[in-house]
Image (cartoon, rainbow, N blue to C red):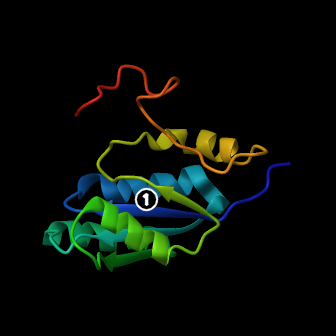
Amino acid sequence: MQKSARVSVILPVLSETGRLVELVARLRELLGADLFEIQIIVSPKSPAEALAACEEARGLFGNTHVSVQRRSPGVGFAYRDGIEEARGDLLLLMDTGAEFDVETLPLMLAKQHQPGADLVVGSRWMHGGIEGCPRRK
């Protein structure tokens, strides 16, 4: 029997608008009861359209939090802010710009539940990663 998880998803946002709402909806479908919260960390340099998309995404899942990045701009600082705010047992750091295949999340969660797994990393460059994915986009 697989144990349940409380997954906190951390999504940094700069200017992504079109994919964010769809991504939050898909996270709900794929993670189901394991999805504990979504932390959307918005850059202070984000345009109004990106902020509006974040607010729309918040409406899809009751435990979605939107906050403005506190430290110097950059995706690394956004992830750090999200990690500090996250309250789940597992942290899922991903982008909102279609760099990550969200359909792999159930497989990654299953791998995490295996004995001895402390960290699961998805990479398009590792053996078993996404076939035909370019190293640079």
Identified by mark 1, the residue type is Val
Q: Which residue lies furthest to the top in this view?
A: 132
- The residue that appears at 74% across and 59% down in the rendered structure is 4
**Point 50% across, 54% down: residue:** 27
Residue 121, horizontal then vertical, whole percent: 53, 43
- For the point 29% across and 49% down, the residue is 97
- Give residue 42's position: percent from left, percent from top: 28, 70
Q: In the picture shown, does residue 84 fall above or below 49? A: below
Residue at image location 80% in from the left, 50% down from the top: 2
Q: Is 16 on the left or on the right of 67, as rendered?
A: left
Considering only vertical position in the picture, is 51 above or below 90?
Answer: below
Q: Quadrant of residue 58?
A: bottom left
Q: Where is residue 55 in the image (x, y as percent from the top left)?
A: 32, 74
Instruction: From the viewer's side, name the closer residue of 22 and 100.
Output: 100
Q: How many labels does the image show?
A: 1
Q: In this view, does 64 lie above or below 16?
A: below
Residue, disc 1: 24
SS state under label 1: helix
| Residue at the extreme right | 1
Position of 9 with respect to 116 (left or right) is left
Q: Badge 1 local density, few (<14 within 10 Å), some, or many (20+)?
A: many
Where, quadrant-wise, is the C terminus in this rendering?
Answer: top left
Q: Where, by quadrant of the figure, is residue 45 drawn?
A: bottom left
Q: Position of residue 62 (x, y in %)?
A: 50, 75
